[in-house]
Image: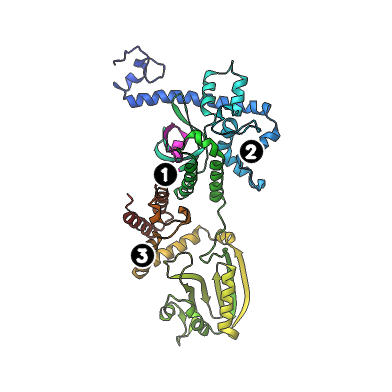
Amino acid sequence: MKIGRNQKCPCGSGKKYKKCCLKNHNIIPAKDLEYKRSLKIYKKLSNDYQELERQLETFTLEFINKDTIAEALDEFFCFPDEPDLITEEVMERCQDLYRPWLLYNWNCLPDMEIDAENREEHLCIANVFLADNMHNIDKTHKALINSMSYVPYSFWEVMDVVRGKTVTLQNIMTGITLTALEHLASESLLPSNIVFGRVVSVENICMIAGMGRTIIPQEMKAGIIQLRKVIADDLSTITDTGLIDWEFELRELNLDIENILYNPPKMSNTDGDPLEHHKLVFEITDPDFVFNTLSPLNVVDTLENMKQHAKTDAKGRILKADITWTKEGNTKIASYDNTIMGEIKISETKLTIQVNSAERAEIIRKKVEKKLAANAKFKVDVIEDMEAVMQQFDENSFQEEQAKHDELMKNPEIRKQVEQMHAKHWDSWIDTPLPALGDISPRNAMKSPDDKEALEALLYSMETPKGSDKFLNELNKKGVEKVKKELNIR
């Protein structure tokens, strides 16, 4: 249809066509026109939403006492066993989730149960406000309340992003895909990111109304899918209406995920011992005897090779040397042939041993005192927690260690050995039950669509480069490709 020069521009600006889009384009693509119209509506809705939220917050303070608000906060955090863990930092991080939940999802009548069947009877704060102002409320505010009330929170995976314009998200629970007009989120989110929140539709415009600030990594998608399987056992088809009954469990899972991401469990070594840095110091008088006596503690390297890297006197006796304490096998990774237990440094008068747990410190001290007897006198065990050690490990130290590692990996024999270890790891990994997959193996995960989806998310995470070690990243990528090929994952 031809547009007259003096007609209103179809982009929705309100200007005449000749003073708007005509001067820029002779023909306006339908897609661009639709976006311009939607953007105009979205901007008005956003302004109205902010104004409505201010009115609702004022109404909340008048309608509900502080004790009840405190109870609502307790309910939002799923009645934590230790309320003190809900710090100001946690509150700040959850504000974007809590405010919409309080206004549009929370049942402000505590004696009335909320479920899918009595949804219409459930009164959230926004609905009470609407009932009290039915005859004088703004039309758009009414549409916002009707559209936003009772929309359950869920986990959303980012499928596509148009910078500064839109974000396309898929609800992991229902499978529904929506494209939301969103400026800020479209600048920060990336495809494959997972977020927790609500996407609502108002006047045929999709917008984010309550989204968490935490980006959930793909390796945690398996846990989300496990909950989806539980919900699917209860509901024939998972819908937004059905998810109302599971709102508490969904919120609880998100809080658990955030707790893991922001408060990771204390690290442990390959033996499962809590990490604790120990430096044991012994006084010695014969470094050559100490070296030859303790060299069998390295089950990987040969005596001749260790001697080549040692400092000797004119007679060939050891003055200074390093020994890596190793043992056969690996508790955490069955495909690894050995485990590094600690580092031993020998000088002319001092023997220093560094290990990463109290248990290993006790073991090595007993071994040394038994093997060296009167030839070594224990002086001190310096203990530091790992946080203190890491603080001392500044950027320069990291670069020095990285340079040493890079130099070591230039050795063809070392590279070959590492490649063989990784190949063995991936060969066994495919049939190893994994906690991330609900204690089933990747091969068995292929038998169920849900488990396959969880496996694909895990593989995506594993092949994504981490750190600056290009060689190890490439090995992981090859390992994932090998698994995909064997399991016929495209």
Say which of 49 and 304 sits in front: 49
Q: Nearer the viewer, mark 2 or mark 3?
A: 2
Where disc 2 sits, the SS reads: helix
- Give the residue type at disc 2: Leu
- Mark 1 = which residue? 192
N-terminal label among 2 and 3: 2
N-terminal label among 3 and 1: 1
The residue positioned 47% from the left and 76% from the top of the image is 298
The Cα–Cα distance between marks 2 and 3, rounded to whole angstroms, is: 52 Å
The residue positioned 32% from the left and 24% from the top of the image is 30
The Cα–Cα distance between marks 2 and 1, rounded to whole angstroms, is: 31 Å
Pinpoint residue 264: horizontal percent, then vertical percent: 55, 53
Tell me, yes or no, if residue 96 can be seen here: yes
Tell me, yes or no, if residue 55 can be seen here: no
Pinpoint residue 80: horizontal percent, then vertical percent: 63, 45
- Give the residue type at disc 1: Ser
Residues in magenta?
A: 170-193
